[in-house]
Amino acid sequence: MNEPSAPPRPPFPLARWALIALAVGGLAGAFAYVAGYLDPQRLTPARVVDQLQTNGGLHPGYRRNHAKGVCVIGRFDSSGAAAAYSRAAVFAAGASTPLVGRFALPGGNPYAPDGGVPIRSFALRLTQPDGQQWRTGMNNMPVFPVATPQAFFEQLRATAPDPATGKPDPAKQKAFFEAHPETAAFRAWIKDRKPSASYATDSYYGLNAFYFVAADGARHAVRWRVDPDNGAAAAPLGAQDTDALAAELERRLAQGPLRWKLWATLAATGDPVDDATQVWPAQREQIDAGTVIVERAQDQASGECRDINYDPMVLPDGILASADPLLPARSAAYAESYRRRTAEEARAGGRPPQEAAR
Ligand code: HEM
């Protein structure tokens, strides 16, 4: 006897195809939205980095911001005083943690004159014995001009060189600052600030707030800075000083290590932890967390900092990011900058294109 044949399968209904298409299309749309393809006005890390390139010029192999700098090697010796607030191994009493750092000037131009602007930066990567790292990028200004990634982007656009003159358009800058009163404290700082003659005599501020997490899980909002202990500052640089800072650093290091005290400021209830334009009151408790010691410098084209992305969200257990919106924006933009410069390096056959450019 013949087996009864299976009943014919009904044709796949059109409605089901439509559903699948909708699901796949929806997913693709979601990805496109997140990537910013659907709304060309949406702020993405790529747009921020494109704008940095517009402002500073395209210099393959270099960081898209803080492009001109020098690597340094040293260590952080903990005082033990911050260990009550943070369980990070770096703060343990007696801990000495190796660091790879970088001093730099702001902007995307690796040939910028040292005397052109008064802003300088100091980035650190500390590596604990358990392999966890604390990366931080600090600037020598005590307050950041803007509080949000969007305002940072608008500021870049307002200060971009005008193609006709090669210089920023003063009218655009004025309009930006008028529309952004939160920039007032920064403007007051930069107005009278002269470009220092040494990386060694500046303080550097982490600016964004973070949390220290203690052994029992208690959290304290903090900001950190480093204060120099390297003698008095020399007369400031003039606009004609093009390449003074790296050589001056080498001269100092030939005499011995350089030192900065690392201070952690504890927030009081109500102090803003998501707004880098607002300074906390001066009477807040300060913890002397230890000493940053710089022992030698290296050329940034071949030194150990070259391949470090000083992403401020790379933190060891015991330090947490706050809700400051600048932090994730920095993290994403630094990654985009890192991807671009390392891809350029790879295309140049592993040879740093920045060396070729010299
Ligand atoms: C939304 C705001 C910001 C954006 C989009 C931004 C963007 C960038 C980018 C793209 C780089 C190059 C990264 C690399 O290729 O390694 C950079 C470097 C740097 N930024 Fe920012 N930045 C922002 C805010 C800040 C703030 C608030 C600080 C200070 C606390 C800061 C300090 C630094 C320092 C120190 C470096 C140089 C790091 C090094 O020496 O390699 N930035 N920034």
Image: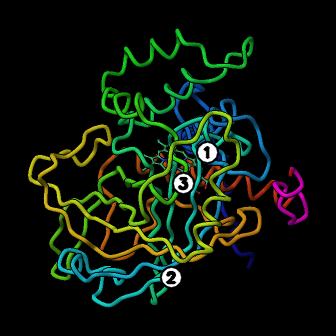
Q: Which residue is mark 3?
A: 198
Q: Give the SS element for disc 2.
A: strand
- Would residue 296 appear left or right of 281 to someone viewing this image? right
Q: Mark 3 belongs to which amino acid?
A: Ser
Does the segment drawn in magenta span residue 195?
A: no
| Dot 3 or dot 2, earlier in sequence | 2
Question: Could you say which disc has been placed on residue 65 in the image?
Answer: 1
- Would residue 331 appear left or right of 221 to someone viewing this image? right
Task: Give x and y (percent) for residue 225.
Answer: 34, 59
The number of numbered badges drawn on the structure is 3
Task: Give x and y (percent) for residue 343.
Answer: 78, 56
Q: Give the SS element for disc 3.
A: loop
Would you say residue 246 is visible in this rendering? Answer: yes
Q: Which residue is mark 2?
A: 98
For the residues labelled 1 and 2, say whether their Cβ atoms are less than 8 Å apart.
no
Would you say residue 13 is visible in this rendering? Answer: no
| Dot 1 or dot 2, earlier in sequence | 1
Q: Mark 1 belongs to which amino acid?
A: Asn
Give whichever of 237, 43 is nearer the camera: 237
Q: Mark 2 belongs to which amino acid?
A: Pro
When asked about the image quadrant of residue 339, the answer is: bottom right
Task: Give x and y (percent) for residue 63.
Answer: 67, 50
Does the segment drawn in magenta span residue 352?
A: yes
The magenta segment is 347-357
Task: Give x and y (percent) for residue 333.
Answer: 56, 47
Pointer 1 residue Cβ closer than 8 Å to ligand 1: yes
Gap in angstroms between the C-alphas marked 3 and 2:
23 Å
| Label 3 vs label 2, nearer the camera | 3
